[in-house]
Amino acid sequence: MKLSKPYYAVIFTNTRTDIGNGYSEMAQQMEDLARQQPGFLDFESARDHIGISVSYWATLQDIANWKANTDHMLAQQKGISDWYKWYKVRICVVEREYEFKK
């Protein structure tokens, strides 16, 4: 992923409850919706014992707009009531990146 710097990363780290009712479908819907938002750049995610999702954005205002999106707010409420035991959100500036690829 080559993006012009600086840009922003929203790191969402979480542990899940045992309630799965609609989680996978909602997660996919939110990723699809985020990809349509102004300023969205990319998305990566992994889950084992904890989940880590990172979305990349052009500006802090783009992140604030995404957080305030009505559908995203409903998903956040459902996450708090049903799907997450714990979560933490970190917003970071990406100033440098490098990668290895075979």
Image (cartoon, rainbow, N blue to C red):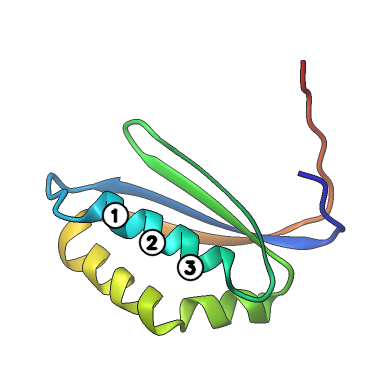
Residue 81 in view (yes/no): yes
On screen, 71 above or below 35?
A: below
Left or right: 18 in relation to 51? left
Left or right: 17 in relation to 93? left
Pinpoint residue 7: horizontal percent, then vertical percent. Answer: 77, 62
The residue depicted at 29 percent of the width and 49 percent of the height is 24
Q: CA distance from mark 1 to mark 2?
A: 6 Å
Q: CA distance from mark 3 to mark 2?
A: 6 Å
The residue under label 2 is which amino acid type? Gln
Pinpoint residue 33: horizontal percent, then vertical percent. Answer: 48, 68
Cβ–Cβ below 8 Å for labels 3 and 2? yes
The residue depicted at 45 percent of the width and 82 percent of the height is 69
The residue under label 3 is which amino acid type? Leu
Cβ–Cβ below 8 Å for labels 1 and 2? yes
Name the quadrant of the C terminus.
Answer: top right
Element type where label 1 sits in the image: helix
Q: CA distance from mark 3 to mark 1?
A: 12 Å
The residue depicted at 69 percent of the width and 72 percent of the height is 39
Q: In the rendered image, which residue does mark 2 sit on?
A: 29
